[in-house]
Image (cartoon, helix red, strand yellow):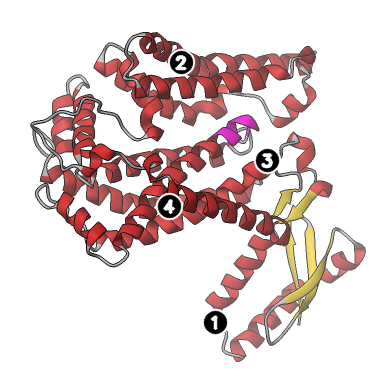
Amino acid sequence: MPFIVKHDNTVLYGVLDAVSGRGEGEWMADTPACQQHAQSVPETVAGAGRDSNVQGHTVPAQTARAFVRDYMAFLLPRDLNVLWTIGAMLVAVLALMLLSGLTLALTYTPDATLAFSSVETLDRRVPFGWLLRSLHMTGATFFMAALYLHVFRGLCYGSYRAPRQGVWSVGTVLLILVMVTAFAGYVLPWGQMSYWGADVAGKAVGAIPLVGNLLERVFLGGDAPGTATLHRMFVLHFTLAFTIVGMVMLHVAVLHARGSTSPSGAAGQERARMLPFHPYFTVKDCLGVVVLAILFTLVMCFWPGLVTEAANYRPANPLHTPADIEPEWYFLPFYGMLQAVPSKFFGLLVSGGAVAILLFVPWLDRGTPATFAAGRWGGLKWLPRLALAGLVGAFVVAGLAGRHHVQGGWLLAGRVATLGYYLYFLGFLPFYSRFARKEVRS
């Protein structure tokens, strides 16, 4: 039975096998034969739908098959590098986190007197419980690492520029949701670091003028972390996980509506230099997931200390404050910024603003891909790369400062790193885009 799928003026024409439902065809772009055949599409599709209903196929099944065909036919620039496989890695790890998390929730008890023992029971008595928890903890580390690389790729190649502001905005909201979910999950084991991490977060929220005390009590459920805090964190962790799934679907939908960027800029998005998602990019994505699975297994089995903290294997003790209270590594840069500012309130603003500022990147950098393809910066094309390297360096130094509690020389390093981080977004990006537009006009 003949069929035709159109996507951005490209026609996939072939023959649909009536038994298997699979098609074999070739890509034919804007040829007279395809254009002539496209005129008969309505009758063909309608006939196919009637035949399918007669054979017992439902409309939802036809819609699902059409969606899969359209998804596989989605055009992407052929020069996408390995950084574009991180999205598939994130989806794979997210699926693993959901499955393992739902299983762990069957045993976990969100009560201050039972939470730690329920986790110990899971590790020691539930069949393969230790494996489920290891998968979940290692998955959290790998998910955050891949997410940071995903954001870096967007900044590096200007994936936030028009017309993809919506893709970037949805992705940034997704990043914030993931960070909140990760913090809530960090509190749930109710070990020493979990308890005091919740305590530090509550005091940081309490530093907000006027409404701080109220927000702290709402956050903790009382004057100090306890059973109410665990209930709040458990519900937040559980519900946000499914919210994240919905946001991922929205992120992919907006991406398909706007198209993907290219390492080559506007030139790489030309029609002649694009290929369908399947089979060219599905193979690359599968290879990336396999490599990730190997690294994941190595860390989980041979270097578990990279994703765990010894102090969190001791039950929470409100009467004993640990000598070194610090969050997981993926929160260390923001923790360093929080400590680098003397005032608690302004430290909270600086730390939270470091994430929130990502929402405004498309409007801080007002250039377009065409602008930067035409502008040569007078031979200074290395300057944006140097500035981005400075941003990465500032992020890492802020994390190291947080790791050392911003003491001694790390206090100065943390403040310089915080300043450098904000200068990239508030100083370099507006200056860079304005200079590039001016050069193009001249």
Give coordinates of residue 13: x percent, y percent. Answer: 80, 70
Task: Give the residue at mark 4.
Answer: 301
Residue 266's tag is none
Amino acid at dot 1: Thr
How far separated are the C-alphas under marks 3 and 1? 37 Å
Q: Earlier in the sequence, mark 1 or mark 4?
A: 1
The local secondary structure at tag 1 comes to: loop
Q: Earlier in the sequence, mark 2 or mark 1?
A: 1
Give the class, few, some or many, for how many residues have Cα within 10 Å of label 1's Cα (few <14, many ≥20): few
How far separated are the C-alphas under marks 4 and 2? 35 Å
Give coordinates of residue 283: x percent, y percent. Answer: 68, 59
At x 34% / y 25%, what residue is drawn?
335
Give the class, few, some or many, for how many residues have Cα within 10 Å of label 3's Cα (few <14, many ≥20): many
Residue projecting furthest to the front = 302
Task: Give the residue at mark 2.
Answer: 417
Task: Give the residue at mark 1.
Answer: 58
> Where are the magenta residues, as a range?
152-158
The local secondary structure at tag 2 comes to: helix
Q: Nearer the viewer, mark 3 or mark 1?
A: 3
Q: Nearer the viewer, mark 3 or mark 4?
A: 4
Q: Earlier in the sequence, mark 3 or mark 1?
A: 1
| Cβ atoms under marks 2 and 1 closer than 8 Å | no
Q: Earlier in the sequence, mark 2 or mark 3?
A: 3
For residue 316, which quarter of the picture? top left
Q: Is residue 111 visible?
A: yes
At x 51% / y 54%, what residue is drawn?
91
How far separated are the C-alphas under marks 3 and 4? 37 Å
Task: Give the residue at mark 3.
Answer: 261
